Image (tube, rainbow, N blue to C red):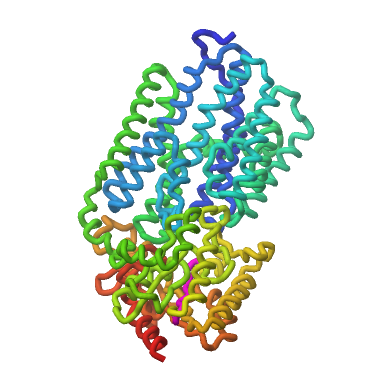
Amino acid sequence: MISAHPHLTSLPYRPDIDGLRAIAVMSVVIFHAFPSWMPGGFIGVDVFFVVSGFLISSIIFENLQNGTFGFTQFYARRIRRIFPALLVVLGAILVFGWFALLADEYSTLVKHIAAGAGFVSNFVLWNEVSYFDHAAETKPLLHLWSLAIEEQFYILWPLLLWGAWKLKINFLALATALAVLSFVLNMSGVQQDLTAAFYSPQTRFWELLCGSMLACLRRHRTLAASASIISALGGSLLTYGFWSFSSATRFPGTWAVVPVAGAALVILAGPNAWINRVILSNKAVVWIGLISFPIYLWHWPVLAFANIIESADPGAAIKACAIALSIALAWLTCKLVERPLRYGEYGRFKTVGLSLSMAVVAAVAFIAWNQRILPPTAEKWLAQSDQIGWELPVASEEQRAACNQRFPQRGEIVKTLPSDNFCVAQNAKEPEVLLIGDSLNLSLYPGLSQYDDLNVMVLAASSAVPFYNVLTAEEGDTARAKNYQLTNQALDYAVSNDNIRVVVLAAIRVTGIAAQAPGFKITDVTNASDNDAQRVFVRAMRDTLQRLQAAGKRVVYVMPNPRLSYEIKSCLGGARPFTLTDNGTTCTRPLNDAFDDTMAYRAWVNEVLQQFPEVVVFDAFAPFCDEKQCYGALNGQVLYRDRAHLSVNGSRLVAPHLHELLVKMLRS
């Protein structure tokens, strides 16, 4: 029987588990600050999942068997364990952001604070993922997705275990069955939607459930002589993951087994295994483990704020200081807030007070987001923010409708595609110039549309290369997995329409693929087994140019504009409240550095263009650069909307050069 007024019993303390927590948190911290030092450090989160599943399940099993389990006591413990440090961090960020962030940044922040206080950050972040989403390093509460998944597990798992106890269902069988189901969902999820698989609780619960399975086995015989071998094997798996994985690893998927198995083996080995006893139970390591939760909470906001304020990578010295500050704040949080509220008398009042405080933080943040309550920087920011929007003042509904009327097949395709695909026509006349490609072509349009002597139409698909049968979506991005269909139809439209004399092809995303940037890949949909990005690109470009020239079309190929190394917001004069250094505030990038980003891509293009001398190359790089540097802003005008895409001002800077070229081609 479960007692009417249970008092939960505690487990014997294992310092090696705190040591494992220390390894997990420091791997995440190092990955976030210096990813090249430990490219797979993100798997520390998976280690946390296993540890959490083990400890929580052990507590529940022990108390169910002793008849001392009670939901009120269980959740009260969770509140006193999680809420104190989280409240301090959320409150500090809410206040600091008010003075340090721009209007749009603060609006996003308060939304994330509300989500963090409600433990739904994973769902909010999942829904925010898009091509034009803010970079991860500018979201100070991005890391709370993992805490949300843990809390969702803490809500569901005790209910299931209590039901299993009542129905006399074997705990190990239940945990194993659910872990297998969750793992299967994880495996199918990474194939269908990698983002969903990353943030979804159902595709992550198996990691916590592996810890639960360990908890079921913890009363079995000890491992004795084999313990050290098992622990060493677990440590080897973690070491392999820390330095063999990277942000390009398709994760979670099968690879997540490595950190989960590694952590499980270390825990299974027990406190007497050599690694557990000598390394993980070392006092310095255990000290880090004891404050690992507040370290995790503090480190990412501190790093993110440094990145935001600097509008660029803050540099090694600032990052090192950020790590030291995070550890110091974590220790103070633990000593002054977490321990006094977690332990001692008046537990019920503390629980109620913490719950009400978290509700207040969530409500305040939600109201600030919903009512657009903005910080003091808002006036300056809003006065200038239109410079970095897409704006597209010439793209009226009539011009969009005119494009859709000429290209009706688009309507059927985009029913299954994201909204960031664009069909815009300059006027009601039949187009002479057709722009096909990704968002680079779209950003060229506002400038070109100023000229009445061109009849321009744009068919742009997000992340699309302007070639036949080529897919360039991020792995697992099902939303853009069919964008190539729109590009195929656009090319067919160009080939079959006699009014179209010049076809302009442009793509900016593929520059990152050529430079082997993680995340995106290029695929030939007619031969998906070919993983050589350059071969796929060259073959598709050659085939597309042959078809266009066979149809009598003249082709302009656009080389992309420079990519910035800083956030363009730093170029809005006086809008940023303060900076830590002068880093990233000059709105320039050295010419050689900017050009190096495109060298691999230019080599791919030139390999093909040697066979097509009739193709005219327009280099969008030149208008932004002089002999020494490239500019993100000129004469008080911001030329970009983010690090890669042009603003309307940038489009108008390029337009005269491209317009002159197109007019000559149409008249010749």
Q: Quadrant of residue 484?
A: bottom right
Q: Quadrant of the C terminus?
A: bottom left
Q: Quadrant of residue 391?
A: bottom left
Residue 507 is one of the magenta-drawn residues: yes
Q: Residue at x 52, y 68 (%)?
A: 465
Residue 41 is one of the magenta-drawn residues: no
Q: Residue at x 48, y 79 (%)?
A: 557
In the rendered image, is residue 436 in sight?
A: yes
Q: Nearer the viewer, residue 445 or 134?
A: 445
Residue 657: percent from left, percent from top: 36, 82
Residue 26: percent from left, percent from top: 54, 45
Q: Is residue 657 left or right of residue 142?
A: left
In the rendered image, is residue 558 in sight?
A: no
546, above or below 26, in the image: below
Q: Residue at x 43, y 43 (%)?
A: 124
**Magenta residues, start to end:** 501-509
